[in-house]
């Protein structure tokens, strides 16, 4: 695997770039150092603590492990955005993000691996997950450095994830925040509930359209708990239309609609703002 990176400020060292700007773990930094993975335009290893001038081009050359997902015959999911570091794919509704057992070969990551295999690549790891019933945008790392950096960005909430849902009833407020901890329901194997002993969970919502008996909302997550949007909207008294697990009325579709419609973040390797939505192509 190889990629290049242009130093964006005077005086930055490789050590500072990896440890402070990208916040890579000690083990990964050590491995890159031992492998002399960071080179200059002449192909020579760059000194770890040498201050570099703005515009200096660094070349990262390192071996990448093989991911364990078995590829499908062909990739049948849409690639919405791609660069040297990540893919952003549109996961269809009803498809798992990744395999949950050995016989699971038709998940989003199996399709991604078919795409990677066609390009002669062997590494792909998802950075976050979407529930099986949720469709939309998913970030996949193309190398371990990107996996490490984007994992941390998810933890630090520096990737803005926007969802769209149609919920039951009319929400009177134009916007609001739901701050209610979420835990497991002891009486149901997969259901989650708002619980004082649950994990911290925060969801922001904004009304985009009011229909006769329902409201279309855009939601942003500060935390990523299982079923978070579904639980929080039901807690508000406005479950997602058709989400019978969370006490919504049955619909003819017998299912709920939740769509991860947009991702926005400062790209750590390209040093520019990236906005990708699931309605059009990426804009930068």
Image (spheres, grey):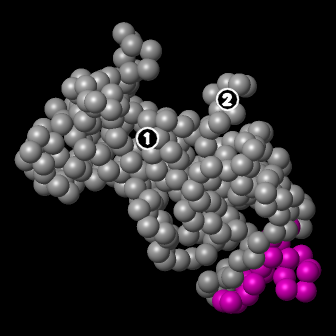
Measured Cα–Cα span from mark 1 to mark 2: 18 Å
Residue 200: image quadrant is top left
Q: Name which quarter of the figure residue 101 lies in.
A: top right
Percent from the top left, x then y, of residue 261? 40, 56
Query: Which secondary structure, mark 1?
Result: strand
Give the quarter of the figure containing the N terminus: bottom right
On whether residue 57 falls in the magenta region, the answer is: yes
Vertical comparison of 190 with 187: above or below: below
Residue drawn at x 28%, y 30% as measured from the top left: 252
Q: Residue at x 77, y 72 (%)?
A: 3
Numbered badge on residue 104: 2
Compare residues 143 and 279 and report the one nearer the observer.
279
- Where does the image place residue 143, in percent across and percent down from the top left? 73, 57
Point out the stretch of residues depicted in magenta: 37-60
Could you tell me residue 171's position as x and y percent?
Answer: 12, 44
User: Which dot marks residue 134?
Assistant: 1
Using the image as rendered, state which of residue 271 and residue 84 is in the foreground.
Answer: 84
Q: Main secondary structure of the magenta part?
A: loop
């Amino acid at each position: 695997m190889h990629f290049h990176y242009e130093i964006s400020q005077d005086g930055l060292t490789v050590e500072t770039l990896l440890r402070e700007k990208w916040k890579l773990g000690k083990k990964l930094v050590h491995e890159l150092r031992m492998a002399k993975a960071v080179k200059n335009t002449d192909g020579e290893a760059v000194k770890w603590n040498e201050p570099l001038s703005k515009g200096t081009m660094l070349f990262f050359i390192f071996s990448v492990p093989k991911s364990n997902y078995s590829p499908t015959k062909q990739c049948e999911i849409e690639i919405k955005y791609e660069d040297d570091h990540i893919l952003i794919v549109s996961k269809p509704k009803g498809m798992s993000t990744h395999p949950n057992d050995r016989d699971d070969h038709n998940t989003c990551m199996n399709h991604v691996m078919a795409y990677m295999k066609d390009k002669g690549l062997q590494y792909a790891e998802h950075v976050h997950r979407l529930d099986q019933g949720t469709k939309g945008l998913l970030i996949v790392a193309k190398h371990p450095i990107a996996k490490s950096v984007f994992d941390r960005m998810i933890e630090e909430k520096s990737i803005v994830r926007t969802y769209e849902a149609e919920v039951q009833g009319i929400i009177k407020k134009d916007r609001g925040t739901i701050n209610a901890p979420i835990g497991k329901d002891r009486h149901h194997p997969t259901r989650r509930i708002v619980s004082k002993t649950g994990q911290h969970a925060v969801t922001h919502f904004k009304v985009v359209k009011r229909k006769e008996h329902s409201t279309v909302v855009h939601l942003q997550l500060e935390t990523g708990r299982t079923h978070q949007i579904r639980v929080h909207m039901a807690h508000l008294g406005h479950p997602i239309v058709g989400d019978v697990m969370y006490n919504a009325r049955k619909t003819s579709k017998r299912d709920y609609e939740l769509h991860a419609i947009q991702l926005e973040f400062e790209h750590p390797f390209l040093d520019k703002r990236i906005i990708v939505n699931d309605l059009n192509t990426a804009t930068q």
